[in-house]
Structures are given as C-alpha cells and as structure tokens.
Amino acid sequence: MEIFPVILCGGAGARLWPVSTAALPKPFIPLMDSRSLLQHTALRLTGLAGARAPVVVVGARHAALARRQLAEVGVEVFIIAEPEGRDSGPALTAAARWIARTDPRALVLAAASDHHIPDADAFRASVVAAAAAAEQGYIVTFGMKPNFPASAYGYIRPGDALDGGAAGRRVSAFVEKPDAAQAEACLAAGYLWNSGNFVFRADRLLADVALHAPAMDKAVSRAVDEGVAGEGLLELGSAFGGAPALSIDVAVMEKTAKAAVLEIDHAWSDLGSWDAVWAALDHDAAGNTVQARAVVVSSEGCFIRADAAARIVAVGLKKIAVVVQGDRILVCDLAASGQVLKDAVEQLGEA
Amino acid sequence: MEIFPVILCGGAGARLWPVSTAALPKPFIPLMDSRSLLQHTALRLTGLAGARAPVVVVGARHAALARRQLAEVGVEVFIIAEPEGRDSGPALTAAARWIARTDPRALVLAAASDHHIPDADAFRASVVAAAAAAEQGYIVTFGMKPNFPASAYGYIRPGDALDGGAAGRRVSAFVEKPDAAQAEACLAAGYLWNSGNFVFRADRLLADVALHAPAMDKAVSRAVDEGVAGEGLLELGSAFGGAPALSIDVAVMEKTAKAAVLEIDHAWSDLGSWDAVWAALDHDAAGNTVQARAVVVSSEGCFIRADAAARIVAVGLKKIAVVVQGDRILVCDLAASGQVLKDAVEQLGEA
C-alpha cells in the first residue's frame, strides 16, 4: 500500500507560552524529550510500510527550520510553504491538490505535527485499518477513545457501520468542545475525541472541497497553480491568503456524506495545554514533573520546566505549572485552559 | 533627651530569597518602595529629638554599602564592622561598649535594620516612653500588640507594673515561636510580639552581659579594645569570632531582673517572609500585590514581584508568591514559613 503522509505544521501555539511562541511554535520544540514534536511525527509516519516522503505544510517563515529539523533525523520532505496561515482546510486542500498531480487517487494520511502518540506501531496499525475505508471513498478521521471527560477536545458520535465491511463507523455527529457536564455525557455515550488526523483519497477530499467549500477550492487551486516550485519545495501563490480560514472539519467533514470515524484506543494527546503535557509525561511519587534545576518541597501534581540558566524553588504548590523561558515566566493553575492562557499572553503583548 | 541609636544590620535574609541573598541581604533592598529598609530605619531614628549619629553594626563585607546607602539619604553614621556575624548579643554588646566610652550611662536605642514601621512619629513617641523606664535601669523591649495569632514571632507575657511609675510592665515570660494553637492562646491572654527592638542604658546592659554572659563579655571587650578605628569606623578585632553566637534575648533578656516590655500598638512587621511583605503592602481588589510587568488573571491574594526584564503571566493562583530576581525564581504558597524557604534555598546550593 502506497501512502502519502501530509504533516500540518501551522499554528502559533500560544497555549504553551512561554516555550512556544510565534517565533518558535510548538511543533519545533523538544517538549517530551530531546526531539521536537515535528521530528517525532515525521519518524512515526515514515515508519509506515509504503510511505512516500512526507509533505509538510508550514508557514513560509518556518520552512527552512522544518527542513533542517527533519534532516537532523534523516527524513527528507517536500515542503509546501504558506504565505500566511489559513487553518487546516486550505492547508490540507493544497497538499491534496499537489499530491493529486502525482496520483489523483493517492491515499493521503494527514497528521498534526504536534501531537503525542507514544506507541508508533499501534498508530501505524490504525493507519492501515483506516486506509481500507479510505480506499472505498470514505474520509476517515481518527476518533480517540476518551479516558476522561475532557472539555478541551471536540467529540464525534459514531453512527452506522461502513458500507463494504471496512473497520470504522459513519460519523453521526460532531460535538463542539463541551462543558464539564456535557463531556461526562459524551464519555458515557461512547463518543470519541476528534483528533484531527485523517486518511482519505486525494480525489475524494478535493471533490468534497469543490462541493462544500468552493471559495476555498478556488483560492487554493490558484495558489497551487501560481506557486513557485523549487527543489523539494512549493511556495504557494498569494491567492492562498484569499482562502477562507476554516478547519477541514468545518469546511468538509461536517458536510460530506463520506465522513467516517475509526475508533483508536492507544495513548494520544494533542499537548494542547501544559496540563496535557504534564499528563503525558512521567511523574515522581508526589505527581510532580520537573524539567528544571529546582528544589521542590511539599508540592503535588506540579509541572515545573525551565531553561538551563534558571534556578527554581517551589514550596507548597498543588497542581501548579511553572514554566520559564529566558525572562518569560508562566505560573498557573495546571487546570487553567489553554484558551485562558492564550488570552493572557495576548494581553501581555506577546504571542 | 540625648539618645544613641544602634542599628543592627546583620543576617543573610535567606527567608526573602531570591531578592535577599548573602551578597545583598534584606536591609539593603528597596522592598516597600524605592528606599532600602536600612535607609528607612536610619531616617526613622535620626528623626528622634536628641538622637546622636547612629551606630551601625554590620558585617565587614557590607560596611561600605551601608555607609553609601545612608549617605544617599543624608545620614552620617558610625560603623562597627564585624569580622563575622555572631547574632545580636555580641553585636549589641560591642555597640554598648563603644558608646559607653563616650558616656557610660548613655541611653541606647537598639533597632533592627530591616523592620517595617510605617508610622515613624508613633514609633518615636514609643521610644520616648521607653526611655523613661530605661533611665531607671530597665532594659525595655518593644512588645508589639498582635493583631493575628502569628506563629512567626516569639511572644512576651507582660507582668507587674514597673517600679517608679514609668510606662511598661516587667517581663513575666518569653515564649518561643508558638504553634498555631499556642499562638491563639497567646493572643487571647494578651501576650505581645517580641520585636527585637530595645531601649536601655549602656552601663545596665553591659553589667548584665558581664553577669549573665561572661564569655560574650570577655570576647567582645577584647574585640573592641583590639579593634582598628578609622574615620567613622571601628573594625572589631578577631576576638569577636570567639563570642558565643547568641541573641540578646537568650544571652541577657531571659536572665536579667531588669527586663521590661512596653506595649506598642502601631503597625509593625519584621518582613520575615514574603507573606509578611505582602501583608505590609497595598493590595488590589482581588488581594493581589504586583510589583512586576505581569498579566494576572483569576488570581487572589498573590504577591508577584520581579525585576524589570521579566514578563510574567499568572493564572488561577490563590495565595501564591512569585518572586523573580534574574534567573532565580521562587514560587511558593504565601503561607509557607520563612524557615521552610530558607531550608529549600540551602538545598538549592544558594544562600
């Protein structure tokens, strides 16, 4: 099975300020260990049997950094450089259109660049299962089996079995990020987390974009056609900026008749907040994760991370994040939402 | 009334790390406003009618800094430089012995250099009242009327009225820093906080030191006699290091028959922890005190202080101190004791 991985590497990632900034967004940061999230993602995808070189869709400002980081781990990529970020809909449409030039019926695996999936083998087995449904014309999204009633994720209600006997269910409904009570109900009803990772045939996605998001289709088509191609690189034309800034969920998945969901139950996190980062890391006996030169006393369930120069004393803290990057310092309730943090960072005059 | 102020300027002040360090201890820090605590103390004392130039007892390492800071606020001082810190007993004995050379019956006002007393006029009125008892041979300590059951201070139980009708009471007992339940009991029983500020006649103190702390008397006498005098300066001889390191409370006050306490009810704080510093400062409507460039969201009762370079985001914190000095960062429960903080700082390998 030949598959074309696409890595979506957009977004500023203010939810992980001060480590993630507009200058060095989350995918490029070594968050879990010494490798960046982008490096981990690329290695996970290139380990797929039949995988072509990944296409990375990234802001022009970070294209060289993406290529350099991936070269460091021995992964050669094709870069599609966006003149500006327009959310996942236009990014994925551009990648599908580029890949369709090689093979209109190419199977595409679209993956976020900044998620944490520790078991790469399990992930790859899921991709193979999803590919069977995608071959039949479904746009398959990965629905992660929830292990707690998260309010930070959207949910998917699985529906009927797929035609043709492939693994997966039709998508019965998408549920926006719920409040705590709704999240409990979603969990009880067997809903799945919407992970934002997909498998589809390029022609299928492009047909649905043309049908359900014609303005996006038009702007992106022109941006690809007028793009400047270089060695392993396509710089999208300025028409890209005219595409509506919509997620692929909103632009296509909520509208297409071919939306399918594959239930996945290996560990997964979008690392969308410091709470999520803490949860994905190992903890000491008191539930603390310390990535810093620090003395931590009488504290529980804390996440403490700092650069090499910092010296930290933490006393009497419960479920607090302390994150230090140079002279930028975050101290927050670990349960504070990424959105609240993002708003506060904007108020500080930084992003 | 002529009075000889003595300012005790020892101690490393690890309880206010990272702002206070061995290199720049607490008295030298502008903690409440743009003036250092030492500057405030000197101005408070020199405003006394009849006050002589203050004698500052300070570690030799910080003697020049003390003189420079006091010159900045127009206060000329006599410096007694300690070759090493030996607690308040030897420091006060040395100052009394030096002053006794001028006038054996001189009235001495011994004040900590790092306390916060916002109402200087009220303080000076208390000194005048204490001086009347001190003239009669009492060693008068300032007993601050407690307004909450603090565990961070020692307490004094006031006893009988003084002979001769001067304001004040005899000291019936000294109580070591109590636990929470004992502190409640002390408060209910009308005990006073032991502030570590005194008024006495030099000859009275020296007689009691000779009687109750003969080893201290001997070592300090020799250190003064063998000291090197310069312009406005006495560098104590090395014999000072042989004096027992004891507080004046332990060496003399708990033993002398002449201990008296004057009840004081103006505002006072020893600023002995970040909690105490926060309590002495103004707060916003949410109870936060912010001395930093910071965005503070959904937080209550917090103290946030940083140097000019730092940029802080604080979210969802309750009664937390965040204190930043260069790359040294403290995050703690505001109620954490100064002692716990001091121990943690030592564990970090800093003081």
Image (tube, coloured by chain):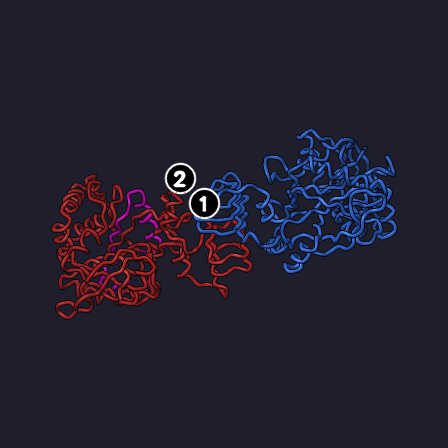
Chain colours: A blue, B red
Q: Please report the bounds of the magenta region as a residue range.
A: B46-74
Residue B349: numbered disc: 2
Amino acid type for the residue under numbered disc 1: Val
- Asked if marks 2 and 1 touch (Cβ < 8 Å), the reply is no
Residue B25 in the image: state x and y as whole percent: 35, 48
Residue with the most extreme top position: A74
Q: In which quadrant is the N terminus of chain B drawn?
A: bottom left
**SS at mark 1?**
strand
Q: Position of residue B322 (x, y in %)?
A: 47, 52
Position of residue B349 in the picture relative to residue B292 (left or right): left
Residue visible at 85% across and 49% down in the picture: A208
- When the figure is inspected, residue B9 is found, relative to residue A62, above or below; the finding is below
x, y (%) of residue B260?
19, 62
- Residue that carries the numbered disc 1 in the rendered image: A296
Instruction: Tell me whether marks 2 and 1 sit on the same chain.
Output: no
User: Pointer 1: residues within 10 angstroms few (<14), some, or many (20+)?
Assistant: many
Disc 2 marks a residue whose amino acid type is Gly
Residue A140 on image: x %, y %: 79, 45
- Say which of marks 2 and 1 sits in front: 1
Look at the numbered disc 2 and give the secondary structure of its residue.
Answer: loop
Residue A164 falls left or right of residue A156: right
